[in-house]
Structures are given as C-alpha cells and as structure tokens.
Amino acid sequence: MPVGLQLLHLSAKPDYQSMYLEMVTDQHDPAISFLAGRAVSPDPLSSRNLTVVSGWLSCCMTQSKGHEECPKWELTKAKLPTRVISVSPHSGRPKLYITRKDEVGRYAALSYCWGGPQPHQTRTANLAEYTRELPMEQLPATIMDAIRLAQALSIPYLWIDSLCIVQDSEEDKVYEIATMDRVYKNSWVTISAARASTCLDGFLGIQEATAERVSKSVTIPVACPDGSLGTAMLSPTRFGFRADKGYSNVEIPVNSRAWTYQETLISPRTISYYHNSIEFKCLAGLQSSDGLRSLELAVTNVFCPRSSTLEPYFYLKPDPDKALSPVPDPQDLEWRWRQIVYDYSAGELSDPDDKLPALSAIASEFHRVSGANDIYLAGLWRRSLLRDLLWARAEPEWRTLDRPTAISARRHYIPTWSWASIDSQISFSSISLGYKTVTSPRVEILDYTVSLASTSLAGAFGCVDGGRLVVRGPVQRIACADAWALFSSEDTLPLTANRRVGTFCADYRWGARPAPVGNGDDRGGGARGGGRRQWGIPCDRGSLWLLGLAMKPDDRYETFGLILVEASEGKRRQRGILRGRKPLRFLSLAMRSDGGSGSGKSTNNGSRNSNSGYCERAGVFCICKEYFAARGPLRIEMERFMDRWGDGYEIRTMTIR
C-alpha cells in the first residue's frame, strides 16, 4: 500500500455511485508507518484528543515545519486583558482576576454564541464578589466547559466576554470592545464552542456523530511495508458516505453569528469543537482530529461561507502599536475589506446597535496595517469611499420586512450611505466590481462627518450616531412615473413581463405586499401600486435624484451611481438599489432634470439640495449598453437614449444623511 494512505474511493456499477471510506489506525499499531489517518475518540477531553490539541499548539507556537508564517507566541509581548479568569488549580477555585498594568501571561479566549441573556454575567454589583470566587455551580454549560478545557490544557487564564467585561457599564463596554483585537490576537489560543447554539448547551459532550462512525467501523488486517502485520479501521467519512455529497459547516451555530466571525478571524490560532470533530486553524491551514480535513477540502464540494484567515501581515508585527513597513498594497486591503464585509454581514446580531462594534476589532487592524493613513467612516474607508458607496444588498430575500420597526429598535443612528444601516448581507461585486467601472472625474467629496457615539479614542471604530456626506457631481432629477416605467422590482416582475430597462431591488419592503406577477403597470393605486411600495420609497417623497458616480471606460456619461430621495423629517433611512438589465425594448422617455440640461451645466446650491435641505440614499442605479442589441434599430435607440441620459445631468452639490 502507498505511504500516507487516508481515504479509499469506491465506485460501484451500474450507476457508478461512489463513496469514500476513511482508513485509520491506532498510534501504537505497526500500520502507522503508512496510514496517515488516526483513530478518533468521541470524547473531546480524552487523553488522545488532548494530546492531539497540545501537539497542534506546540507546532504552531514554535513555528515548526509548515508553520513558518505563523506568529511565534512570546510571553514578553502577550499582555493580559484588563480582566481574566484565573483557572489554575494552584490558585484555588476559578475567580475573576484584575490584571496589573502591562502584566503578561498565557491565556485562552472563548468564542461562543450567547443565545440570549447571559445568566450570572459580571455587573457592577457582583464585580467584587467574582474577584473572590465565581459561582461555578450556577455558570452556564459552555462557560463551564471552557474552564475545564483550559485546565486540561494547563492554560492558567481564560477570557470570556460575559465575565471579563462589566456588562452594565457602558464606559467599560466601549473600552473593552475597542481592545478586542488585542484580546484575541494576543491569546495563546481561541476556543470556539462551534457546536453550541446558546451558552447553556456546552461543547465538550460526547460527539454523537463521531461515536456513530466509530460504531460502524470495520477492522481489517493489513500487511505493512516492513513485513509485519497491522490493523486498519474502515469507517464512513464524517463529510458523508456518498462522494457527491459535499461537506458543509454552514449550519454550525457559531457560523451564523456576527460577533464570532470577528473573534475567530482575528485570532492567529483557533480550536473549534464541532458535533463531529475537533479542528485547528492557523496560518498554516486547517487540521482535524482525524487527520482528514485537508483531504475533505480536496475531494468534496465544500462550501465555506466565510473567510478563514487574514493575511500574515495582520499577525506578524514587531510592535502592536506601530504600523507595518512597508505598508501592504492599498488595493489588496480594499478588496480584502469588501470580502470581509460580505462575510460579516451574513451574521446575525441580537442587538442591532452592535452592527459596527462587532466589526471594530477587524476595522482597527485594517487601520493599523494601512499605516494609519486612512479614515474609517461607519464601515467604509475614505480612500475608497466613492467606489464603496456602490454597495448593494446581496440576499435574495429581506431579513426585516418592516424598516421603520427595525430602525426604532436601535439606540444609535447609522447614516443611510453606510452598508451598516441595513440588516442584510452586503455585496460590492454586483455594481462597483462586476462591471469594472471607473470613478467619474466629475465627482468630488467636499465634506464628510461621522458622529461617534463615544468621543474617546476607544470608540473610533464603534457605534456612530449620525453622519453627513457632501458630494458634488453630475445629478439629474427623474419623475417617479418615469422611474416606474424604466425600472421594475427585481423580486416580483420578470423583465419579460414588464419590458423594463432595469430593476430596482429594495433593501426593505416597508411592510408592503408583493405586487402581482405579470402586472405591467405599477403606477396606479391598489394592487397596481404594489410595485412602487415594494421599491421601498414612500409615495410622498416626490422625484428621485440620480447622482452619477462611475462609468465604464468607454462610456461618455456616468452610468452607475446613487439614487437619492428628499429626506423626511427626523432620521433618514435607506431604501434599495437600482440595477440595469437587458430589456425587450427601449422606452422613449424625456429625462426630467428640473430646469437644467447639458452634462456640464453647474448649479450652485451650496452644500444643500434644492427643495429640502438633505437627502437620503435610496439605492444604486446601473445602465449598461451591453444589455442591448449590437446593431439595428435598438442600437440607434440606445445611443439616443444615452444622449438624453447624459444631457439630463447638471453639476450639483448633494448632502446625504
């Protein structure tokens, strides 16, 4: 047999259905010389599993072969957080320990799903009591398991947010959340309670799926290369018995939460306890307790919903308070941030005000590695602001149907031009990247203001309480009736039915019911007005303002940009996006520009729009010539349409709230 054998791929006639079997052996068996797979134990705290985990940590910490890019853990640089839980048996029963200034030590950090209110969390009233002794008999199962695991791995300290942050102190929460990047990055290891949906579930119980696999295994004799006789165990792989059934960890509870994404991404080393395996992630890659994780990635249709690691320069640095030299490529950082926003925004939050704080540690790291030369603006960056304003909702369905209700649940207000203002997964690729656009030279950002909820330095990447963006560029005004004729709602009316040149995908329905499919005119009232309401623009807002931001290199006018509406009284809210699609025909509409024409005409209204003082984002528009026929009458009509479209622009200054 070949050395390093781990999997057997079996295929059977007549339909050639295939399956994988893992081939493992015990570490003391002669067959270990050529079988790479190891027998698994369903008990996470078994001596076998603890030995495997300790071996992973040792190899990574010492930068052994294959771990050359992993950050070497150094005690002198491992500053302890403000508070940690002392779990060493030599210090008595576990208790909350308030560290001294610049005190160093070895600690683990816990990443887990709260799943609701935390029982027995640290509060101002019990802080002194917890420093003497924690109520071990009353702590939830996940926290108890974390303490047991830290003790089993001989890690003296443990950091858990519900106990190490004073939960009823806003000042302490702001400070501690702002330092989370160092909490997880300086830890010896991050423990991910991946299988636990709530803090009450625990994660160190017997892995039923692993126990079932072990019970189905068959032991066979094998001849070893040296002539001795060994044994091998054949059992179904944990990623499925059929080879065409992909393995996925999408449904794992920890993957659905926003906070845990940041915690595991920023950690240089993470041990994850799943329902069927134990996995170790570091910069060197991904390993599993059965030694088969890398093969699973190679032979199955794996869907990984989130990024697994950051680039090495996020971890390898001479001093945590100094920027890197040389600074990474800004375009690489821009692309990486967009991917992180896409991954992060898929997560769920119990508190809607945590939208920006739950990403603050990663944002702080991006600011550091950029040389501190960029400005963070409520989830976007000043350097790439014009491009990143063209974000769009990535989900096919809304999470929240009632936008006013969702906003009223927040204590803080996020400006509408920020992706963090909506509860949806966000994508930049459909507009700003998908069509390889370039920023219009006629667009200029005159001013930007973001009001931080906390004025301290620690709150620079956290909650915001409003913001303003002043942009000068080509703008045209289009009547809603013309907009209804040109564009349709992506989710209800197929283009083949309504003959539109584009679609409008609303971020929120505002409680409106879907319009009937096949309704070609949604400008009327009743059921025929459902499409308008579903766009997410209230009927009393009047016309739309189209602010051109970008174009394709061969376009004469801006064909990508923001859809704005006049702001209502009180807080302004975001509505949706507008996308161009291939139509069946052009509609000959006169673009209404509110008294001006010509792409170069300038109207000086100061920093405010005409009529109302401010406007709010309603979405993104896109018009592409590639959607239309290359020759014939349609091409001529397209050129005429583009001329009318470009002539409708006039240079204005728009203030977006």
Image (spheres, grey):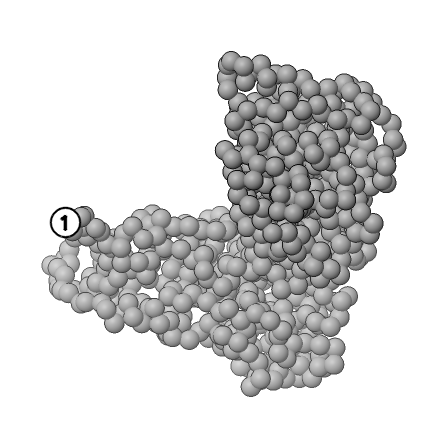
Q: In the image, 24: left or right of 199?
A: left
Secondary structure beneath dot 1 equals loop
Residue drawn at x 23%, y 69% as measured from the top left: 216
Observer-nearest of 472 and 581: 581
Residue drawn at x 46%, y 62% as measured from the top left: 252
Q: In the image, 262: left or right of 655?
A: left
Asked if residue 584 shows in the view, the reply is: yes
Q: Quadrant of residue 84?
A: bottom right
Q: Quadrant of residue 180?
A: bottom right
Crowding near the residue tagged with mark 1, few <14, some 14–19, many ≥20 C-alpha atoms within 10 Å: few
- Count of numbered circles in the view: 1
Q: Position of residue 78 (x, y in %)?
A: 61, 61
Asked if residue 423 shows in the view, the reply is: no
Q: Which residue is mark 1?
A: 13
Observer-nearest of 210 and 437: 437
654 shown above or below 345: above
Q: Quadrant of residue 428?
A: top right
Image quadrant containing the C terminus: top right
Q: Position of residue 45 (x, y in %)?
A: 41, 74
Q: In the image, 500: left or right of 616?
A: left
Q: Position of residue 508 (x, y in %)?
A: 64, 50
Q: Amino acid at mark 1?
A: Lys
Q: Position of residue 563 (x, y in %)?
A: 70, 36
Observer-nearest of 88 and 148: 148
325 shown above or below 459: above
Residue drawn at x 51%, y 49% as measured from the top left: 307
Residue drawn at x 72%, y 46% as measured from the top left: 538
